[in-house]
Amino acid sequence: MGAKAAIIVLKGDITDQATDAIVNAANNHLWMGAGVAGAIRRRGGPDIETEAVAKGPIMVGESVFTGGGTLPARYVVHAAVMGQDLATDAAKIRAATRSALRLAEEQELTSISFPALGTGVGGFPVRQCASIMLAEARRIARSSRSLREIRFVLIDETGYAAFVDALRTSNERHVR
């Protein structure tokens, strides 16, 4: 068993992260529309979507792995947090977070960056999302074999504040 992975919250653009992988808040058909997915496609190139769609559709809560195109991150983990109805809930966010972290472990990645899953198009409350995602990260961080850093990267102040508050209540560290 490896050392405990650090859990870090940052304010910024997830497409700027040079972690081994960044996570895409995906739909289960893996087409990349607006929000985080659109930003990843614009910055990383259309090959990311082409590769992802070829691996779909998948069940909501599952994840697939693609190359990172021209992103600073080497890979993209597409975590299906919603179906074609673009609706999500706590169970779907929990499952998608867990799936992405398990896939990162299977691929022996050392670092991964997450957005707030399901809070954009999915409309899920960011404070609830933060609690759910951080709980899953803590669970994996305690027994991680390869992951050394799990980042949560929030583009806006509201999301950042919600994740920092949730992280503080768990006695983990955070970085601005």
Image (cartoon, grey):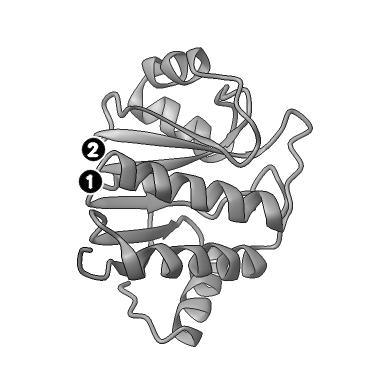
Image side of residue 3 versus residue 66, left or right: left
Pointer 2 with pointer 1, Cβ within 8 A: yes
Residue 1: image quadrant is bottom left
Q: Determine the secondary structure under disc 2.
A: loop
Give above or below for 114 relative to 67: below
The residue at the far front in this view is 1
Image side of residue 114 versus residue 86, left or right: left
Observer-nearest of 31 and 102: 102
Q: Determine the secondary structure under disc 1.
A: loop
Write down the residue under mark 2: 72
Residue 132 position in % (x across, y down): 59, 65
Residue 115 position in % (x across, y down): 48, 52
Residue 8: image quadrant is bottom left
Residue 48: image quadrant is top left
Write the residue at 41% across / 47% down.
102
Three-letter code for the amino acid on which mark 2 is drawn: Pro
Observer-nearest of 41 and 90: 90
Three-letter code for the amino acid on which mark 1 is drawn: Ala
